[in-house]
Image: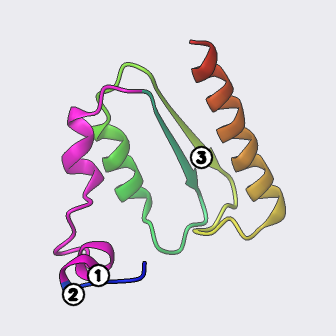
Amino acid sequence: ARCCTLRSWLSNWSIDTTNGDAREHLGSVTVPVLLVNGTADQGIRRSHTDAVWDAVVSESRRRVDIEGGDHYFTDEAARAEALDVVADWLTTQESA
């Protein structure tokens, strides 16, 4: 971003003051949801991923756990698998 206020920075980077809490907002999302999770993520705990998944109310939802995927999917094989999952999911959404 070209401009960042203290409020917007904290909303992005502070778990205590963020406005982007998926657990809070996914209860009102009715469009299809895809959750791709790397099992070796150093920043996102499995309990957090599970809580986000449990908050999804959309009838069209899919969760995929990528073995060995870290937070940025730096492993080439994990990244390729994640990208394939997203591409396949998008294709199924286009035809639905």
Range of residues picked out in magenta: 7-31
Dots 3, 1 in contact, CB < 8 A: no
On the image, numbered disc 3 is attached to which residue? Answer: 65
Q: Please name the amino acid that badge 3 sits on.
A: Asp
Q: CA distance from mark 1 to mark 2?
A: 5 Å
User: Looking at this view, is 69 or 95 the one in front?
Assistant: 95
Question: In terms of image quadrants, where is residue 18?
Answer: bottom left
Q: Is residue 44 above or below residue 62?
A: below
Is 35 magenta? The answer is no
Residue closest to the far bottom: 6
Q: Please name the amino acid that badge 1 sits on.
A: Trp
On the image, numbered disc 1 is attached to which residue? Answer: 9
Position of residue 54 in the picture relative to residue 88 (left or right): left
Q: Earlier in the sequence, mark 3 or mark 2?
A: 2
Q: Residue at x 67, y 61 (%)?
A: 69
Q: Residue at x 64, y 20 (%)?
A: 92
User: Looking at this view, is 86 or 38 the one in front?
Assistant: 86
Is 19 magenta? The answer is yes
Numbered marks: total: 3
Q: Please name the amino acid that badge 2 sits on.
A: Leu
Q: Earlier in the sequence, mark 3 or mark 1?
A: 1
**Where does the C terminus fall, quadrant-wise?**
top right
User: Looking at this view, is 76 or 1 the one in front?
Assistant: 1
On the image, numbered disc 2 is attached to which residue? Answer: 6
Q: Is residue 28 above or below residue 6?
A: above
Dots 3, 2 in contact, CB < 8 A: no
